[in-house]
Image (cartoon, grey):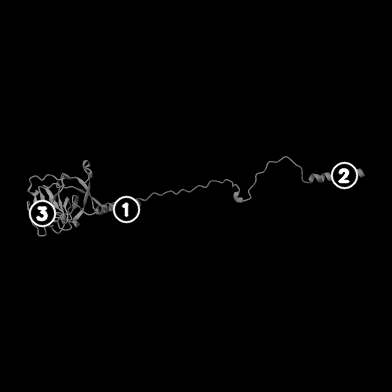
Amino acid sequence: MAKRADRRRREIDGSRASNEPDTGTDLESPTKPSIPGNASERPQAAGPKTRTKKTVKQPKSRSASLVELAVIVVVALGLALGIQQWIVKPYRIPSGSMEPTLKIGQRVIASRIYFGGPHVGEITVFHPPEDAGEQQCGAAPHFVKPGGAACDETYPRPDNSIQYIKRIVAGPGDEIYIKDGHAYLREPGKRTFVREHDPYIKSCGESPTCSFTTPIKIPPGHWFMMGDNRGGSDDSRYWGPVPRSWIIGHAIVTYWPPDRIGFL
């Protein structure tokens, strides 16, 4: 009986031991991947891609396009008119009075901007006095005679419908006379008359209009104009010096015809 009891005790002890945790050393098991504790750091399952909605540009209506075109045209015309009014303006040469420098039909651009004001030697665009074509001199209109004095007084009203283009040969306070088509100038404070340097003029020939040998004095604020074709120009010799307020601008470049393109 004692032997049976002892064997029964050993079987019970062995059963308990098999249920206790194993404290022995075993083969190293593969390390399990760690799962981050923060849910935001956990990899998210890939879901379906979200498509970006594209905005389709609607075509402009016909009326909107016409309005836009009209605005562009108006702005362009405004800029063109503004440039011609305040900056530069093109001109066509209508006569041979400035030959050989400028020929009939040649085109030039005149600048309305002056740095220091008009000066002797430049080619200028201006309004002539009324009835300049009649060669009337002064407020009490009269004709001047070649061989004597050129006109020294201008008719008081300009003809704003016409533009002339000539060369300035004398300015305010200068004294001037013309001989054989050449201008002789005595500046204020000078003792002698000096002939202009004029390689640009056309020979005056035998025309009686080539000489006005009695000196005249240019009034303040006025400019004496002559064409380079001294024998074929209607200019200040007949209708007098031009006030500064009648001057439109000075020619700076010629752009037509192509073989004459250049600065003046």
**At x 86% / y 44%, what residue is drawn?**
10
Q: Position of residue 140 (x, y in %)?
A: 9, 60
> Can you name the residue that lies furthest to the front here?
191
Question: Of tags 3 and 1, which is closer to the observer?
Answer: 3
Q: Position of residue 12 (x, y in %)?
A: 84, 45
Q: Earlier in the sequence, mark 3 or mark 1?
A: 1
Residue 238, labelled with which disc? none
Tags 3 and 2 touching, CB below 8 Å:
no
Dot 2: what SS? Answer: helix
Q: Amino acid at mark 3?
A: Pro
Mark 3, residue position: 215
Indicate left or right for 62 with 146 as reference: right
Report crowding for label 1: few under 14, some 14 to 19, many 20 or more residues within 10 A (C-alpha): few
**At x 8% / y 51%, what residue is drawn?**
213
Residue nearest the viewer, comparing 140 with 145: 145
Mark 2, residue position: 8
Q: Amino acid at mark 2?
A: Arg
